[in-house]
Amino acid sequence: MKIALFNTKMYDKQFFDIAIANTDHTIEYFEVSLNSATAKLTPGYDAVCVFVNDYLQADTLEQLAKHGIRLILLRCAGFNNVDIEKAHTLGIRIYRVPAYSPQAVAEHAVALLLTLNRKTHKAFNRVREHNFSLERLTGFDVYKKTIGIVGTGQIGIAFSKIMKGFGCNVLAYDIVQSQEALSQGVQYVDFDTLLAQSDIISLHCPLNHATKHMLNMTQFEKMKQGVMIINTSRGGLIHTIDAIQALKTGKIGYLGIDVYEQEEHLFFKDLSESIVADDVIARLMTFPNVLITAHQGFFTNEALEQIAQTTIQNIDLYISNTHTENEVI
């Protein structure tokens, strides 16, 4: 099968070249994102492979179908960037990578938590300037704090294991309770109880109509004063403008995000010599208690290897018409 892989970075090519080495498949790499303007590049290919910030809406999908594309390979877990219903109407099947090193994202969530708390990023910069003062670097013991986890899929469970290791009390909210989480001693509560009792809230759930802006001003008002919020899932889970207001009042004491609602215009690009026109993220970056990373939670050797291998396996599953949970139905 001939695949057009869009939004290619050097690390994508490195791992996909290895994954297809002993197969009959071929990949052509495109640095551009796949959208209605770049879909013209797809004639002659059997499938397209895209990432989280490639938005495949009706107009793009219609062009893909016209060019004979019948398979979309998502090298990510989420699929909110694709009009699934339209794709199915056009006879296009969609496969994803539902789990790639859950530990990678969970560990990054913990890294955000600890960095915000102990201010190691600020200490690093201070020491480089020969400022060895400890003023304004005070943190708190994570031990015995109450952690609220929203979403107990594989990443949420991996995160809960780590926080249990810190000696934390772990609460969780999910529409389906995980037996594995329960066996760890995680206590399931309703959403409002989790918001009210948690010192630290970490989001580990997909973005859909039910979860969009699940954290907004109404929910912030139910939280403890000075709460820490971590989001390594999807930017749209948080109403960013409301979060800015909650930061101003001190309701949110710490905010660590690896995702941002409008990240497709920013993340995975070097804009260091450009003017960033996004006033919302510019405002967020003015807060000393906000830490932003550019969707790097997944970014480990193990995860990149698994993404590439699973994506190639998905091609074989499609060809053999084998049922798999990797297909988005």
Image: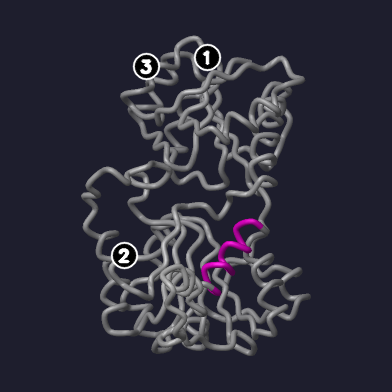
Looking at the rendered structure, the secondary structure element under dot 3 is: helix
- Looking at the rendered structure, the kind of residue marked 3 is Lys
In the picture shown, does residue 107 fall above or below 73?
A: below
Q: In the image, 6: left or right of 298?
A: left
Quarter of image, res 211: bottom left
Looking at the image, tell me whether mark 1 or mark 3 is earlier in sequence order. 3
CA distance separating discs 1 and 3: 11 Å
CA distance separating discs 1 and 2: 42 Å
How crowded pointer 2 is (Cα within 10 Å; few <14, some 14-19, many 20+) is rated as few
How crowded pointer 3 is (Cα within 10 Å; few <14, some 14-19, many 20+) is rated as few
- Looking at the rendered structure, the kind of residue marked 2 is Met
Q: Which mark is residue 285?
A: 2
Q: Which mark is residue 40?
A: 3
Residue 110 lies within the magenta run: yes
- Residue numbers of the magenta segment: 104-114
At which x and y percent is residue 95?
60, 35
How crowded pointer 1 is (Cα within 10 Å; few <14, some 14-19, many 20+) is rated as many
Q: In this rendered view, identify the residue nearer to me: 45 or 113.
A: 113
Residue shown at 51%/56% (left/top)? 206
Q: Which mark is residue 147?
A: none
At which x and y percent is residue 50?
50, 33
Residue that badge 1 annotates:
45
Residue 293 lies within the magenta run: no
Looking at the image, tell me whether mark 1 or mark 2 is earlier in sequence order. 1
The answer to whether residue 329 shows anywhere in this view is no
In the picture shown, does residue 266 fall above or below 203?
A: above
